[in-house]
């Protein structure tokens, strides 16, 4: 029986003293391999997990509530804080949802830049995944090498938008800036570097590594049916043999024009997922290379022309009265999209990131729901952790690649 | 007289609304005959009260009591094997109702359907957890955020907010910075109720600036010691520069200059 006081608070629904052989432990929220703020309550029998209960909400900031109290443009920087490993993919998913609501399309050059940034963010996120996953499992040096390359990618992001983590590099209706001089050359040399490092460092260190294989193979097995049932998306779903990538199946931006492959693994385990992440980085580098000639052929317009919703370019605001008036109204009141509801899914590095927006014709969204992939992947933990050993729990959490910014929102 | 502020929706409103402005609507298209969506509507039969296509996705309005059967039909007959998302929209102020939606995905056809229904304030909805495990977390979140009860859910408990929290944050009646309960929650939890007078309510506005707070804010030119009470007014401290750093080279005594002269 617990006797709560100020020093030992009452643990909800937990019975620590038990009659049988099981033991209850708290894994997190301050555990280094809990990937931020996951509190996992595990019931153990010896070293085997009998029951797992993920407890989330330690990073809840009420982002959906904030969306109801901000105009559409004001909310965009807040989306950086969802999946803070790859912020541009959140910015983009939100901007695309609002664009679908408004019925506008970004100009060609903006699309090229957005696709470049999305794929660059995918590489950043996957490098982060491989670094932390390897560190959790015990491979320290991979962490150091992967973070080195990730730093180059973040330098590229910094050159473009001035921020390393919270990019806000996409606007509703386009992008704010053109690529700076020399950016494309740097990006291409980064692609070379990543491809080289993938083959000669990460895969050389891990793929055939005996310890790595022992720790990952047949750990965290999810059948295709379970993966669909639990709402898994992205590499978690493709790792279970379901060929589903929103970039291919429901193409947005320029993905219908690009030539890339979707790797699928039918191993259903953590090792298969690790191989997918590696292959996806290669495909992203391949996409980035294809985008360079597209960029050179595109017209320099960066923001869509929709005076009702989007401010005119700066030169027009400074020289033309009507553009200035529009800009004033859009800044002080915010855009008023048509009434209606829209759900727009995008393939973020973690899985399906979708925004459901319900608009009542006001400058404030009536309801915004962020469908975060990690939220559902966290829910899955309560099933796949049962029956595994406590050392594998760390591998499985790492393999789901959850980020608590978007789990808790 | 004090200005009347409605209590049923305390979310931010635009300061200016044009009386004659009528918001347009996102176009709703008819379900095309012979398409995949037409088959879905046909499979649902009379259970689909209203159906149309909005931004490329089928929207089906149903009766709240039939949600389980409808979603079961969609899963087993139409191939919608994933429930991507489920949540609610608060329409209590206008209609006294919640609007609930389920976002379903068909992986083979690459099609999406949104099932929409409405329930009254104190009504419950049937859980679809036996069909889709992803609804486990999604329904808990809906319960946490709106207080909508879900029947036959295996473990209906708050998920993002603490278990002993009062109020449901995504209701339109709930203010952005939290209500009174929220302001005292951490004070009571960490220090105890008896410390309320000493500590005061939590400031939950992240943009608030208190010019008389001498612990967290500095005043350039009006510096005071840390923690001093300056509610009576602060005195101006003229900025003094150190003599050793700034050397007046125009002076006769300036060493180097004098030498060169």
Image (cartoon, coloured by chain):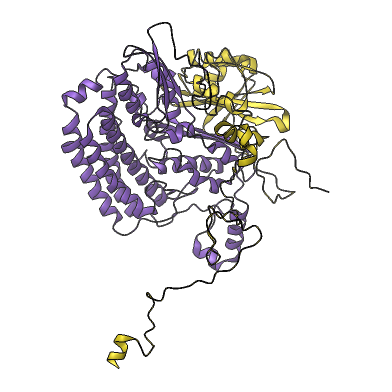
| Residue drawn 64% across the image and 32% down it | B171
How far across and down, in percent of the image, does residue A208 sit?
16, 26
Q: Quadrant of the C terminus of chain B?
A: bottom left
Quadrant location of residue A210?
Answer: top left
Query: Foreground residue, A240 or A148?
Result: A148
For residue A25, side relative to residue B57 (left or right): left
How far across and down, in percent of the image, does residue A59 sit?
48, 34
Q: Colour of chain B?
A: yellow
How many marks the image carries: the answer is: 0
Q: Is residue A36 visible?
A: yes
Q: Colour of chain A?
A: purple
Quadrant location of residue A271?
Answer: top left
Quadrant location of residue A44?
Answer: top left
| Residue drawn 42% across the image and 32% down it | A37
| Residue drawn 74% across the image and 48% down it | B20
For residue A206, side relative to residue A312 (left or right): left
Query: Foreground residue, A88 or B143?
Result: B143
How far across and down, in percent of the image, does residue A316 sit?
52, 64
For residue A186, side relative to residue B182 (left or right): left
| Residue drawn 16% across the image and 33% down it | A204
- A83 vs B229: above or below: above
How far across and down, in percent of the image, does residue B166 sit?
63, 28
Residue that extends furthest to the bottom in the rendered view of this protein? B261
């Amino acid at each position: 029986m617990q006797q709560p006081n100020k020093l030992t608070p009452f643990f909800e629904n937990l019975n620590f003293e038990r009659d049988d052989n099981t033991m209850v432990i708290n894994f997190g929220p301050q555990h280094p391999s809990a990937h931020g703020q996951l509190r996992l309550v595990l019931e153990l029998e010896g070293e085997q997990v009998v029951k797992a209960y993920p407890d989330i909400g330690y990073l809840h900031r009420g982002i959906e509530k904030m969306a109801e109290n901000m105009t559409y443009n004001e909310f965009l920087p807040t989306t950086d804080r969802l999946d803070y490993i790859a912020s541009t993919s959140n910015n983009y998913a939100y901007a695309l949802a609002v664009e679908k609501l408004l019925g506008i399309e970004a100009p060609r050059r903006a699309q090229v830049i957005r696709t470049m940034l999305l794929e660059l963010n995918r590489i950043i996120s996957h490098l982060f995944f491989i670094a932390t996953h390897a560190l959790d499992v015990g491979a320290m040096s991979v962490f150091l090498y992967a973070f080195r390359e990730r730093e180059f990618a973040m330098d590229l992001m910094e050159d473009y938008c001035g921020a390393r983590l919270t990019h806000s590099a996409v606007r509703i209706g386009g992008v704010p800036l053109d690529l700076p001089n020399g950016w494309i050359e740097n990006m291409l040399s980064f692609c070379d570097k990543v491809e080289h490092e993938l083959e000669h460092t990460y895969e050389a260190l891990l793929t055939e590594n005996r310890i790595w294989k022992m720790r990952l193979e047949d750990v965290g097995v999810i059948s295709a049916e379970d993966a669909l049932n639990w709402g898994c998306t992205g590499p978690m779903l493709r790792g279970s043999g379901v060929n589903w990538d929103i970039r291919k199946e429901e193409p947005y931006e320029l993905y219908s024009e690009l030539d890339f492959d979707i790797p699928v693994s039918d191993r259903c385990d953590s090792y298969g997922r690790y191989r997918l992440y590696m292959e996806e980085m290669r495909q992203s580098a391949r996409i980035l290379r294809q985008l360079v000639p597209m960029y050179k052929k595109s017209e320099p317009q960066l923001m869509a022309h929709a005076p009702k919703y989007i401010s005119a370019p700066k030169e027009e605001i400074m020289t033309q009265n009507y553009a200035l008036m529009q800009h004033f109204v859009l800044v002080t009141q915010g855009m008023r999209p048509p009434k209606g509801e829209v759900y727009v899914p995008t393939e973020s590095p973690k899985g399906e990131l979708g925004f459901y927006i319900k608009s009542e014709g006001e400058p404030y969204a009536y309801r915004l729901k962020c469908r975060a992939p990690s939220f559902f992947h966290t829910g899955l933990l309560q099933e796949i952790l049962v029956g595994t050993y406590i050392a594998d729990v760390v591998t499985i959490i790492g393999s789901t690649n959850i980020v608590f910014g978007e789990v808790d929102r | 007289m004090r200005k009347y502020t409605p209590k049923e929706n305390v979310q931010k409103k635009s300061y200016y609304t044009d009386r004659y402005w009528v918001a347009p609507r996102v176009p709703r298209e008819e379900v095309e005959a012979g398409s995949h969506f037409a088959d879905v509507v046909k499979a649902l039969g009379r259970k689909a009260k209203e159906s149309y296509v909005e931004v490329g996705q089928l929207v089906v309005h149903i009766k709240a009591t039939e949600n389980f059967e409808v979603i079961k039909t969609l899963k087993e007959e139409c191939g919608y094997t994933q429930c991507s998302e489920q949540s609610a929209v608060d329409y209590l102020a206008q209609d006294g109702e919640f609007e609930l939606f389920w976002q379903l995905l068909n992986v083979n056809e690459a099609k999406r359907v949104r099932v929409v229904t409405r329930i009254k304030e104190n009504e419950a909805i049937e859980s679809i957890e036996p069909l889709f495990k992803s609804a486990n977390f999604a329904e808990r979140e809906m319960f946490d955020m709106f207080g909508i009860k879900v029947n036959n859910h295996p473990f209906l408990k708050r998920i993002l907010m603490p278990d002993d929290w009062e109020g449901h944050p995504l209701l339109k009646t709930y203010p952005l910075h939290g209500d009174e309960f929220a302001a005292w929650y951490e004070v009571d939890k960490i220090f105890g109720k008896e410390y309320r007078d000493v500590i005061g309510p939590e400031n939950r506005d992240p943009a608030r600036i208190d010019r008389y707070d001498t612990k967290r804010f500095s005043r350039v030119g009006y510096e005071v010691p840390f923690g001093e009470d300056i509610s009576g007014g602060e005195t101006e401290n003229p900025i003094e520069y150190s003599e050793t750093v700034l050397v007046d080279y125009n002076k006769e005594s300036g060493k180097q200059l004098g030498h060169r002269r």
